[in-house]
Amino acid sequence: MSYPNTRLRRLRYNKTLREMVEDVHLRVEDFIFPVFVCEGSNIKREVSSMPGQYQFSIDKLPDLFKQIISKGIKSILLFGVPIGKDEEGLVSCDDNGIVQNAIKFIKKEYPEILLIVDLCNCQYTTHGHCGTLVDDDVHNDKTLVNLSKQALSLVKAGADILAPSDMMDGRVLHIRQSLDKNGYEKTPIFSYSIKYASAFYGPFRDAANNSPKLGDRKSYQMNFKNSIEAIREAESDIKEGADAIIIKPALSYLDIINKIKSKFNIPIIAYNVSGEYSMVAAASEREWVDRLDITLEILMSMKRAGATAIITYHALEIADKIKNNV
Ligand code: PBG
């Protein structure tokens, strides 16, 4: 059937009808808001390359959580920003470390919030790489030992879900086994299965202070000139016991989200990363784009590609617009 019998505009004239036939939906429950917690007290420090995003000391978290809860956001992704670092990142396994203390505080004060904790070594190593260096490269299996230790320490503190972001081979299995051995078989692992080595993480490195001092992360994060490798990464993490898969970056990788969605039956979480946020922030500051309209369109595109949920720095500012469906 074609024109003039078919007129696709018929479904577009009336707002209520337009809304009725929408087939992609974004809810506040889909959002996971990243939170950076730093040592010290009375600190709410803006991240210079991510205007509107802050590092908070634990005593200042209530200001933020008031906002999170009032906007209806139910899940956060927590990152620790420690002062002390060491060669192997062992400081990340300290039961009284910054992230562990933040977890305890959040679980006590806001038990209703779903607390996902990023699991990696890069904020905790002096060299800024995601694991233990041997001959100037991150040693896969030595790093697994640290990650499992860190994982246990995070769940003991009260983390609801762990999100390993290091990209070592076998880490989901290793972490799963050590959680199970210690009675944490109910704790889900949301694995950053597909994490490309990306310039889109630039601003995050200001937020988390985790830049590699030497070299780059290309020997462990994925090459963005590859696409089928994403399927192998997802496959192996699912076999190892991942409960959901995080894909990042998101905006330039919608094809990858869609590919994984069509191939596997597992929740997919898109990470709308720092560089994606900062580009929108910078362009809207200059009034070149409408900040909330463009944000909604970007987040919707991730859902349309197949994401189940989205980790996004925009969660708080966009929540009202989503609730009112405007
Ligand atoms: C570190 C980590 C990174 C991000 C999340 N976890 C950065 C990196 O690998 O350098 C990036 C998130 C963002 O850019 O918003 N393991």
Image (cartoon, rainbow, N blue to C red):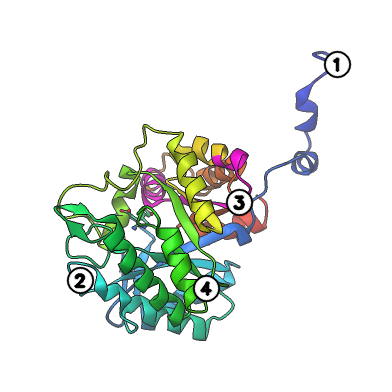
Q: Name the residue under label 1.
A: 5
Q: Which amino acid does label 4 sit on?
A: Asp
Nearer the N terminus, badge 2 or badge 3? Answer: 2
Q: Quick one: SS at disc 4?
A: loop
Q: Residue 85 — which label?
A: 2
Q: In this view, does 22 lie to the left or right of 307?
A: right
| Mark 4–mark 2 distance (CA, rounded to whole Å) | 25 Å
Nearer the N terminus, badge 3 or badge 1? Answer: 1
Q: Quick one: SS at disc 1?
A: loop
Q: Which amino acid does label 1 sit on?
A: Asn
- The residue that appears at 49% across and 40% down in the rendered structure is 231
Q: Residue 266 — which label?
A: 3
Q: Estimate the x, y position of residue 47 in percent, counting from the top left.
A: 30, 61
Q: Which mark's residue is nearer the viewer, 3 or 4?
A: 3
| Mark 2–mark 3 distance (CA, rounded to whole Å) | 36 Å
| Mark 3–mark 1 distance (CA, rounded to whole Å) | 41 Å
